[in-house]
Image (tube, helix red, strand yellow):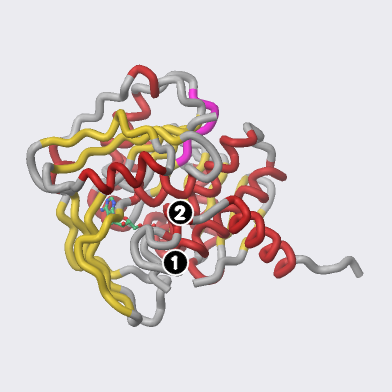
């Protein structure tokens, strides 16, 4: 089953303690689509400027991503500049240029509107809502966001969450959004806003899944963390869509696939590693995770 994704397609300039790059391919929708493309069909909705090279679009096409909904308009592509210190869990934003995204009014291609799986990757919640308004009867709507939107558009974000089943967010952002230092309290507050499942990403400490009944935890390994959250979400929702199974058991497996994709993504800048995996790589790391987290009964 295919996934419709809206989010940023960007040029990133990133500095980590291990190196730096300028104007490389990035963006929440780019990382998500590439990651999810290993599991199922992906239909991308986003906008880029005339400075966006065709080779990047070709890379997405090579991964099988449907780019009919990727518009190229006059102007400059979205740009993000940031850095990480040795604590790779915390991204520091130096500059966000929305550029062509500031005037973007998404018009979802007719062929995308029946997608049963919708992922609203990190972008303006107003745009996320506009996309949601145009899809018919989705089986699962999932979304991500970041501090930029939590601080800039909190009311729109709350409105969006009423219509979302699965919310995927960073630990620090969950605390900031709810004004709670306790993660458990923050999770409860977020679940009260609408989503039936919340996944809190904790960088190298893995991810936690909360729903009304339980908490489940998965581990994750780390180099350049940019895109880790989006590739995590790509593996997670990609696996759910490929199986069409939304039981809690399957959500647990999907979280491990999310962690597998994120752990590959962080091994190189940009799409350097994530763009060139094969199914065997994914399978073998899944099994590594299993061995790592398996323990015997008493
Ligand atoms: P993450 O998976 O959280 O590391 O997301 C990294 C990606 O988010 C980068 O490739 C950026 O281009 C993109 N990004 C950064 N800030 C924003 C923003 N305010 N809105 C949408 N995308 C963003």
Residue at (34% x, 61% y) in the render? 270
State whether the magenta stretch is mostly helix, strand or loop.
strand
Q: Secondary structure at mark 2?
A: helix
Rendered position, 187 above or below 126: below
* Residue position for label 1: 266
Question: Does the residue at mark 2 contact the one at mark 1 (Cβ under 8 Å)?
Answer: no
Instruction: Report whether the residue tagged 2 is closer than 8 Å to ligand 1.
Output: yes
**Residue 44 % position (x, y):** 35, 36
Compared with 12, 7 (above or below) is: above
The answer to whether mark 1 is within 8 Å of ligand 1 is: no
- The reply to whether the magenta stretch includes residue 141 is yes
Residue 215 screen position, x and y as percent = 65, 55
Could you tell me residue 146's position as x and y percent?
34, 55
Residue range in magenta is 138-142
Magenta span contains residue 187: no
For disc 1, the neighbor class at 10 Å (few under 14, some 14 to 19, many from 20) is: many
Q: Which mark is residue 183?
A: none
For label 2, the residue is 231
Task: Identify the residue at horizontal 35%, vertical 24% (top origin).
Answer: 133
Query: How dense is the environment of label 2, judged by Cα within 10 Å: few (below 14), some, or many (20 and up)?
Result: many
Residue 147 location (% of width, % of height): 31, 58
At a point 12% along the width and 48% down the height, the residue shown is: 51
Quadrant where the N terminus sits is top right
Drawn side of residue 88 relative to residue 295, left or right: left
Q: Is residue 145 visible?
A: yes
Q: Earlier in the sequence, mark 2 or mark 1?
A: 2
């Amino acid at each position: 089953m295919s996934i419709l994704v809206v989010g940023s397609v960007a040029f990133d300039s990133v500095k980590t303690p291990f190196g730096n790059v300028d104007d490389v391919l990035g963006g929440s929708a780019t990382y998500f689509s590439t990651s999810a493309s290993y599991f199922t069909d992906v239909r991308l909705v986003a906008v880029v400027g005339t400075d966006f090279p065709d080779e990047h679009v070709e890379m997405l096409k090579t991964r099988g991503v449907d780019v009919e909904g990727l518009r190229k308009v006059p102007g400059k592509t979205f740009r993000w500049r940031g850095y990480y210190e040795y604590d790779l869990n915390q991204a520091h934003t130096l500059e966000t240029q929305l550029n062509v995204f500031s005037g973007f009014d998404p018009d979802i291609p007719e062929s995308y509107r029946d997608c049963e799986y919708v992922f609203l990757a990190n972008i303006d919640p107003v745009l996320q809502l506009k996309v949601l308004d145009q899809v018919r009867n989705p089986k699962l709507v999932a979304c991500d966001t970041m501090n930029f939107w939590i601080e800039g558009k909190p009311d729109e974000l709350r409105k969006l969450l009423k219509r979302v089943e699965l919310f995927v967010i960073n630990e620090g952002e969950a605390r900031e959004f709810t004004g709670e230092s306790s993660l458990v309290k923050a999770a409860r507050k977020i679940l009260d806003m609408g989503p039936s499942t919340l996944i809190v990403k904790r960088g190298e400490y893995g991810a936690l899944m909360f729903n009304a009944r339980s908490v489940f935890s998965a581990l994750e390994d780390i180099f350049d963390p940019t895109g880790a959250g989006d590739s995590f979400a790509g593996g997670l929702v990609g696996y759910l869509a490929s199986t069409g199974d939304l039981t809690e058991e399957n959500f647990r497996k999907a979280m491990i696939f999310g962690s597998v994709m994120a752990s590959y993504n962080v091994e190189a800048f940009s799409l350097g590693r994530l763009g060139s995996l094969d199914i065997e790589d994914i399978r073998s790391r899944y099994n590594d995770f299993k061995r790592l987290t398996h323990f015997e009964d008493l």
